[in-house]
Image (spheres, rainbow, N blue to C red):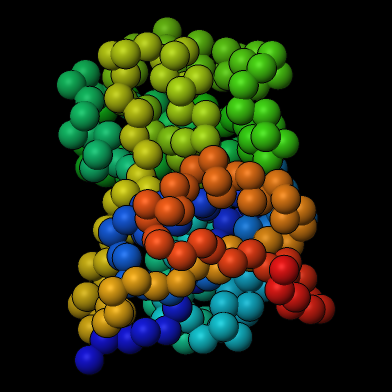
Amino acid sequence: MGDNAPIGIYDSGLGGLTVVREVLSLLPGEDIIYFGDTARTPYGSRPPAEILGFMQEILAFFAGQKVKMAITACNTMTALGLEQAKTEFPFLLIGVDNGVPAALAASRKQRIGVIATEATINSGNHARAIKAAAPAARVFAQPCPSFVSLIEQEKLSGPEIETAAREYLMPLAASGVDALILGCTHYPFISPLIRELMGPAVVLIDPARETAAAARTQLAHTDKLATRARGQVRLCFSADLPRAKRAAACVIDFPRARSQAPSFALVNLQAYYSEV
Ligand code: DGL
């Protein structure tokens, strides 16, 4: 049987591309439509009601694209809106894996760090999941409010991101964590910097791989895996395609992932859909 309809993957901006990378490698036959809201990023310090409104608009766009599944490649929208949205749209909907099983498996000291946006940290989701799985574990949660906007500005190195990273990460390093969950899909863009500041003894957990694996499992269970060998990739953004193209080239090796180059499109969720 199978289902050759596309999979939608979305984020507030460029961060979800780190999830696209893993989906491309685990599900080579799938057509993928990515949407990154580069016009309105970052989401993580906005009021929850506004973030939920943006999420509804993106999911309505995917409904129009007749996707069979949407992957919420954003921890902030996963934390705030996933459970409710699952009941509202006619396709499978999954969120970012919380990284907790991998972190607990990697941590010998059961001291787990979590870095994420303010909205994700305030939701308490990671801390609850860690405590539920391992009541004796210690959780050190650190919001990193300026990371997303710096990464969106392509400041992956240099004094601004280094100063911010030191401010957020030095207390975590001092607290003796030995596993650190990257609880925001933008953060793998700066994992070399995070690794340098946290030191070699701390295992960084990027849940993108587990997220792609969960998508594959759900598609397999519902008999919706694509039947073709190689799918197509369309990367849509609400603003600034040149920046989006540079970011995509920075995280995804397209010639290796797919023989065909991705197509890019500028999408205004309310008004128009134009291909570039
Ligand atoms: N990549 C999003 C996340 O995982 C960032 C949200 C934002 O725009 O602040 O939470």
In depth, the one of 30 and 113 nearer the eye is 30
The C terminus - image quarter: bottom right
Residue 136 seen by the camera: no
Q: Is residue 65 above or below residue 105?
A: below
Q: Residue at x 35, y 28 (%)?
A: 204
Outermost bottom residue: 1
Q: Furthest residue to the top?
A: 174
Establish if 42 lies above or below 172.
below
When asked about the image quadrant of residue 201, the answer is: top left
Query: Would residue 194 appear left or right of 12 to someone viewing this image?
Result: left
Q: Hey, which quadrant is residue 104 in on the image? A: top left
Q: Number of callouts in the render?
A: 0
Toward the right, the furthest residue is 271
Is residue 58 rendered to the left or right of residue 199? Answer: right
**Percent coordinates x, y for residue 154 in the rendering:** 67, 34
Q: Looking at the picture, how far across and down is residue 10, in whole percent?
A: 55, 62
Q: Is residue 119 above or below residue 29?
A: above
Vertical side of 9 occupied by 107: above or below: above
Q: Is the N terminus in the top left, top right, bottom left or bottom right quadrant?
A: bottom left
At 46% across and 72% down in the image, what residue appears?
232
Give percent across and percent down for residue 21: 42, 52
Query: In this orientation, does residue 118 appear?
Result: yes
Q: Residue at x 32, y 56 (%)?
A: 25
Q: Position of residue 234 (x, y in %)?
A: 55, 68
Which residue is depicted at the point 24% across and 39% down?
A: 102
Decide which of 52, 135 is in the foreground and name it: 52
